[in-house]
Amino acid sequence: MRWARADMPAFSVGDSAPHPMAVRAADALWCRLESAPPRDEGKMFGVLVVADRDGRVGYTCGFSGMLDGQWDQPGFVPPAFDVEARDAFWPAGEAELGATTAALEAARVDPEGQAQRHALDALRRHHAAERDALRALHRRRRDERAAARAALAGADDAAAHARHALDQASRGDAAERRRLAAAHAAAASALETLVAARDRRIAALEQHRADRSRELQQRVHDGYVFANARGERRSLTALFAPAVAPSGAGDCAAPKLLAHAFANGLSPIALAERWWGPPPLAGGRRAGSFYPPCRGKCGPILAHMFDGLTREASPVFGRAAVHPDEPRLVFEDDWLIVVDKPCELLTVPGRTTDLADSVLTRLRKRYPLATGPLLVHRLDLQTSGLLVAAKDVVTHARLQRQFAARLVGKRYTAWLDGTIARDRGVVELPLRVDLDDRPRQIVDPIHGKPARTDWYVIERRAGRTRVALLPRTGRTHQLRVHAAHPAGIGAPIVGDLLYGRPDHRLLLHAEQLRFAHPHDGRPLIVRSPAPF
């Protein structure tokens, strides 16, 4: 760490663009990392610019989780827990969990147990077939008895005797069903006992593993106690209560860097985190790009650790001053409106009063007689382009049905941060929200919702590629993730704060909409050229 005297600025977290001091520190760390062997997996690294008690300024470095299988590495801050205290219980606990898992897997694949399960399943199928055959026989007999009863006439002794015989036959069928059920139960009893015992063993092992895992995780969480700038200390468990802290909470770079600074009497000045190495399989990270701390794992911890620091005000997106004439009207008739939303104007109001300005708010003032929800769909805050609104409830419902049925043709234009060699393609990557870092979306082939984007190149210039994006589905951040992901187009949209790097704005614009008029069915094509 190199020191030099400097004034103390307000603490900068780097929620959008990192502080220049943090960028310089990150660049120095980047030079170190680039001299190391290539990595198979990427990782988040962080730098924290700090000042000592004499006002000398330097920086510390940290990484998320473990690096090369170790918590401690030379030149980086230590983890936020006592390694020796964890080593006193974790290896033994991990070995116990491993042994339980091995016993569980052995019980699941035990040949004898599997043979018993297969034999029981086969026996049950055979019994089901016998029951079906008996039910069919009984239905035929019941139909025959019904016909016989209908043919009986009069109330003489012969007719009464015949009816009694038919009733006895019905009772005989019921007794036959009971005998078959008893025979089936007796035949399956031994196998059911064996299979049930095996299932109980497996369930007991699963429960034991889950209980021990929770106990060990609680002991791990108890080992994290975080101080803030006021010297107040809170445990990881308390910071996430009443919820349970997610796995890996406390091991990210930012909490580790701040914990080291407070423990050594250093004053934080600027924090920045940067991804190094290949992107994760889920996407959302690019080598060399800066990212703010995640919300899910770091949010509650950092909210506590920042308490007492004089911080730079974080940007509040959606507060930007937008000209009162916006959004510009592109099309209007008696039933609907199409406007061109500018970048930095919310589609609908935010949750707080200072985020009340939006396209919807402004359209309400322009069209006080309009009924219903007005807006039919939405655009992200930083995306500009065409939005459709309906003046009445019936028009709104008809337009929404077209959007829901994917009958509306959409075309966006965007500049991508990189030169794309291919001329066109199709991206089909399922998406879901990143539970640890909302609203970021990630690719998940198992739990993600299907998402498709067609695209083609319009222009290549100065290391950037202008593309047309045609979404066939409408998932959150679909175009932004499909552009940035290495299995997608492979380059983020310029100015994408979540999946790329900052610029003067997000260069994404909804330039064309094609749909059927909700009242006369005529095709409508509305265009608005991109302002970039």
Image: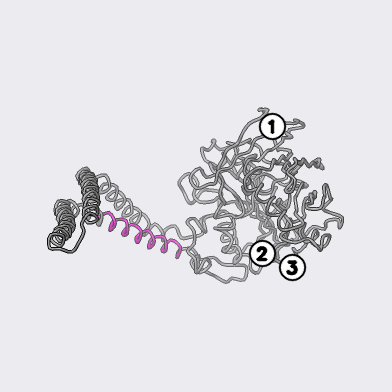
Image coords of residue 115 (percent x, y): 21, 43
Numbered range of the magenta stretch: 201-222
Residue of label 1:
456
Observer-nearest of 194 and 7: 194
**Crowdedness of circle 1 by 10 Å Cα count: few (<14), some, many (20+)?**
some
Mark with earlier residue (1, 2): 2
Quadrant of the drawing holding the C terminus:
top right
Of helix, strand and loop, which one carries label 1?
Answer: strand
Q: Please, what is the three-letter code of the amino acid marked with disc 2? A: Arg
Q: Residue at x 20, y 57 (%)?
A: 152
Question: Taking the image as drawn, is residue 312 in sight?
Answer: no
Q: Quick check: 141 left or right of 470?
A: left
Residue highlighted by disc 3: 353
Classify mark 2: helix, strand or loop.
loop
Mark 2 surroundings: few (<14), some (14-19) or many (≥20) residues within 10 A: few
Query: What numbered label is drawn on residue 53?
Result: 2
In magenta stretch: residue 203 = yes
Identify the colour scheme used: one colour
Marks 3 and 1 sit apart, C-alpha to C-alpha, by 41 Å
Q: In the image, which is nearer the foreground, mark 3 or mark 2?
A: 3
Q: Amino acid at mark 3?
A: Thr
Is residue 365 or residue 274 the one in the foreground? Answer: 365
Of marks 3 and 2, which one's residue comes earlier in the chain? Answer: 2
Please, is residue 155 above or below residue 105 in the view? below
